[in-house]
Amino acid sequence: MKPPLSIRHVTDEERAALETGLRSHEAFTVRRCQIVLASAEGQKPSQIATTLHCAPQTVRNVIHAFDARGLACVRHGSNVPLRVEPVLNAEKREQ
């Protein structure tokens, strides 16, 4: 059986930034900070999901994002798609 998923060690500067993020006006930032701090305290993803009323997969996604990008994962990114393909391409326009 695999060990429970948890984040890497959180530095003092990161912890301070996460605790500041708990007071953010954006719910996205607050929720992500809550998840990262709970994981840093040693809670399992299923426990965090139950406490915060979200899906366990959401918690796992945040943990993976924090491990990959650090504090940048707590800020909400752009909603603009990376690629946009037209619905009516040349073939469909001909029809």
Image (tube, helix red, strand yellow):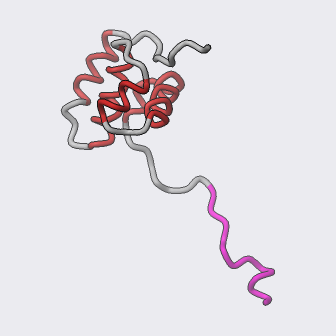
Left or right of residue 30: residue 79: right
Image vertical order of residue 46 relative to residue 87, above or below: above
Left or right of residue 75: residue 91: right
Please provide percent x and percent y for residue 71. Answer: 40, 26
Which residue ends up furthest to the bottom in the rendered image? Answer: 95
Q: Is residue 88 magenta?
A: yes
Please provide percent x and percent y for residue 33. Answer: 32, 28
The image quarter containing residue 3 is top right
Q: Nearer the viewer, residue 90 or 50?
A: 50
- Residue at image location 47% in from the left, 17% down from the top: 6
- Residue at image location 19% in from the left, 32% down from the top: 23
Please provide percent x and percent y for residue 34. Answer: 30, 28
Image vertical order of residue 47 relative to residue 92, above or below: above
Span of residues in magenta: 83-95
The image quarter containing residue 89 is bottom right
The image quarter containing residue 84 is bottom right
Q: Nearer the viewer, residue 68 or 55?
A: 55
The rendered magenta stretch, by its main secondary structure, is classed as loop
- Residue at image location 26% in from the left, 17% down from the top: 16
